[in-house]
Amino acid sequence: MEITFTINDFEGPLDLLLHLIKEKKMDLLNLKIEIIIDEYLKFIEEMEKMNLDIASSYLVMASELIEMKSRLLLPRQIEEEEEEIDPKEQLVNRLIEYQKYKDLTEEFKELESERKQIYTRLPENLKEYSNTDTVINNSDITLDDLLQAFQKFLERKKLEQPLHTKVTKKEMSVEERTISIRKILSTKKRVNFLELFDVLNKEYVVVTFLAILEMAKKNELKISQDKEYGDIICEVVHE
């Protein structure tokens, strides 16, 4: 059964041309332009016979194709051919660009269709579940106090950072960092909380912070603060 297309089935004159090229099983790079021009004009003529309103863009393309066909049929001087841009090449380039755009649009449509299969939950306010007043073992310091002190420390270090720095990566596990902190406390007994962050990269900072919390949880060290907004001190817990 033959499928009949109307002008409304296409998104524009280039879309119609691509359809006609596909229908004739032609390759864009080896396009027989005279055949495609005839097919396009024939299609437009049939649509007019059906009393369909044809957008001006289709008629503009029809006039361009008629001019192109006439130029292809007329003999031209070699000098003129060298100076003028080949109208066939121009049209092929336009069609190639449009095909890229069309392929990309189809890809976006597929991604949109896949995204519609995913349902996300609206964001919630999780503050009611948080408890920043949680007191760390053997300490009057809360987790929020530690985080605020450390945030100020990072801001200060950022301002002190030189314009040109060489970053070295120091990888370490929480267990390894715990051992190194134990060695520091065995020598100094008391140390400023912020002094334990001697390397400022994300991985090292995280393991150091977790190691301190884990040691406090196990009563290996005590975290204290002499006065409000004062230094936070980590000291070894005497059994």
Image (cartoon, helix red, strand yellow):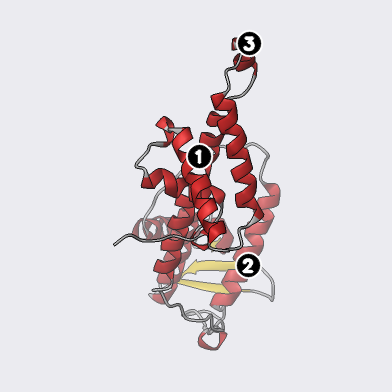
Q: Residue furthest front?
A: 49
Give the secondary structure at mark 2.
Answer: helix
Whether label 3 touches label 2, CB < 8 Å: no
Horizontally, is 224 left or right of 212 in the view?
right
- The x and y percentages for residue 157 are 65, 52
Residue 232 position within the rendered picture, expressed as x and y whole percent measured from the top left: 60, 68
Query: What residue is disc 1 on?
Result: 37
Label 1, label 3: how far apart the Cα atoms are? 26 Å
Of residues 53 and 151, the one drawn nearer to the viewer in this rendering: 53
**Is 211 situated left or right of 56 in this image?**
left
| Residue at the (69%, 48%) spot, across then down | 160
Q: Nearer the viewer, mark 1 or mark 3?
A: 1
Q: Is residue 110 above or below residue 131?
A: above
Q: Position of residue 30 (x, y in %)?
A: 40, 30
| Alpha carbons under labels 1 and 2: distance apart | 75 Å
Q: Quadrant of the C terminus?
A: bottom left
- Taking 148 as reference, is 56 above or below it? above
Instruction: Give, as a three-letter code, the residue at label 3.
Output: Glu
Tell me the residue that label 2 is attached to. 149
Which residue in the protein does label 3 denote?
79
Question: In this orientation, which residue lies closer to the viewer: 236 or 148?
Answer: 148
Crowd class of label 3 (few under 14; some 14 to 19; many from 20; radius 10 Å): few
